Amino acid sequence: MRFFEQWTFFFTFTHMFLNMMNNQIKWISIAVLGVIITLIILYVRSKQNSLFSEKIIVNVSTQLGKDLEVFFKPIGADFIEVVKLVEDVNINLENEISLKSSFYDFFVSHPVFSAVIYRENEKKEFVMYRDKGSYVYSIRSAISKEDSLYTWQRFKEPGKEISSWSEIININASRWTGGVVNPGKEANSISWNGEAQSQYTKIPVLEGTVFINKNTTVTLEIPVREVVFALTRYKWYKERKIFVETMDGDFIQIPALKNDTLILHNKDDLPGMALEDTVLYLIVKSLDMTEDADMGTLTFNLDDERWWVQTTNLYPVSYGIAIKENELLIGKIKQNLYFILAVFIVLSGFFILLYYRKRKKSFLTRGNTDNVDKNDFNLEELVKRNENKNLEFKSTLRWDLRENRVNPRLEEVALKTVAAFSNGDGGILIIGVDDNETVLGLESDFNSLKKFGADYFEIHLRNLLNTQFGISFTTNNITIDFPELSEHHTCVIQVKKGQEPVYVTLADKSGQKTERFYVRSGNSSQEIKSLSELNSYISKRFTS
């Protein structure tokens, strides 16, 4: 099934399904359906693309190149700034104050670097690095390629020294010879290297050395955790290998976790590389077999598992990524699943918040037709409002205060109000409060019944409702509560917006019973007598 046909099918299914839902859950269902449909299509398309692993690895590698460029491009600008700093300020190892102040300012404005090493000739060296919210530096006038003595000074900022001490450090001779005197390096060019543990900060670092001139260099160290953080998206590939080939032909393998160390492979030690990392060994061997340093896409089988590799040249280094074939698909699906999950959580949170706010608003102002819990509105606030299309006050249910007797016509008025609310947008009928917002209570109604109290009053009221509208309607659409207000019992009848027309059967003056249809018109219940008007109203109200 082609992609267009898949979407056509799912849109048709969604349209049919939504037509069967009621409006209250439609938007939430749309969100859920959207997530489900996206997951299904993603799964189907991933199956279709399983034959095109070479395309997936190229796309992943292209994205990796963009991520590396985004990370290293600003760093390249930082190196240019360092060169300009050294040349313009005329920094030299004879001026300790100028060195400390200049590189301190550079550190403060460039937090990505953990250490700086400034060298002149083979005799002098300035080192500064970050440590626990402070800065540590040392100047050595004589450099040994073996054990070296450093005298460190710790400070918060220039002029605010904290402490000092001495330390013997064993300098890596091979690392040193690639650093200072290197006639083969052009001025202002950058050479990249990696250290499993910095001589100074004791953490894995990438080192970039810029050659100011033939005898002067500045080396900046970048913690590996910064690189790992920049490549977070590739954690979805469980056994992925990201590697960088330096200008000298050595390989640096970037770890997957920020606390892991760099893995360094010497280009001249292929047997050792084969023992340490068979995958990288096969990649290097393949690179040696081609004249093009940008080999492109490579695949091979190792221990019955197929690997895909993509190498690309990004001056001044080449980089590559190697992933197992099954991880290519799983990784892409994981990426999308987490994105979809995030969207689903956000949408769910939005609809939950919307629903919560909706229930907390006044029943009258929101025009909601759902049943509302008695604690969701403030009765004292309700009785202070004027009657409207959603709110009605009745002094009593059946006791005529003027004639001082039971009047069945008053019960008919209450039934008309219930029907009108149901045929409209729903509403609240409060019995025991008059039109002047005076709380009268239900005592007169209680006294008119065989038994005094709210329980028997509710039985009588429900009998009226059941007889007029049916038990099913009363149970599903009406809620009755008896909150106290001003030390009086009141009756609060909540009526939901009806799903079907509701009629009231009343007797006329001759005793003939007829069905009548009532709606709310402002703050009163009005009968629609015209047959054409009735049909028009029902058509618009109950079929939309």
Image (cartoon, rainbow, N blue to C red):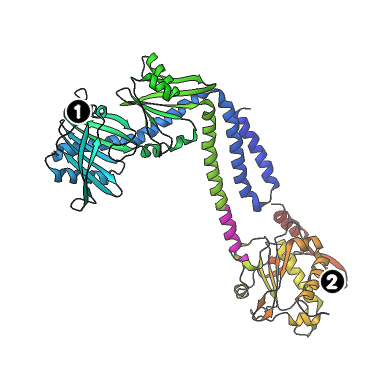
* Residue at image point 69% right, 81% down: 440
Above or below, 427 relative to 125: below
What percent of the width, then of the height, locates residue 419? 75, 65
Image disc number at residue 111: none
Report the side of 282 relative to 398 (left or right). Answer: left
The secondary element bearing badge 2 is classed as loop
- Image quadrant for the N terminus? top right
* Residue at image point 78% right, 85% down: 404
Toward which corner of the image does residue 524 lie, by quadrant?
Answer: bottom right
Instruction: Please identify the residue farthest to the right as the structure is shown.
Output: 511
Q: Which residue is mark 2?
A: 508
* Residue at image point 73% right, 64% down: 478
Confirm whether residue 406 shows in the render: no
Report the side of 370 relative to 70 (left or right). Answer: right
Above or below, 103 relative to 443: above
Per the picture, the main secondary structure of the magenta-coloured stretch is: helix
Tell me the mark number nearer the camera, choosing from 2 and 1.
1
Q: Which is nearer the eye, 204 or 102?
A: 204
Specify the segment rendered in magenta.
351-364
| Marks 2 and 1, the one that precedes in the sequence | 1
Above or below, 434 relative to 64: below
Toward which corner of the image does residue 396 lie, by quadrant?
Answer: bottom right
How dense is the environment of label 2, judged by Cα within 10 Å: few (below 14), some, or many (20 and up)?
A: few
Toward which corner of the image does residue 62 lie, by quadrant?
Answer: top left
For residue 362: magenta? yes
Q: Which residue is mark 1?
A: 187
What percent of the width, then of the height, locates residue 87? 15, 36
What percent of the width, then of the height, locates residue 53? 52, 24
Q: Amino acid at mark 1?
A: Ala
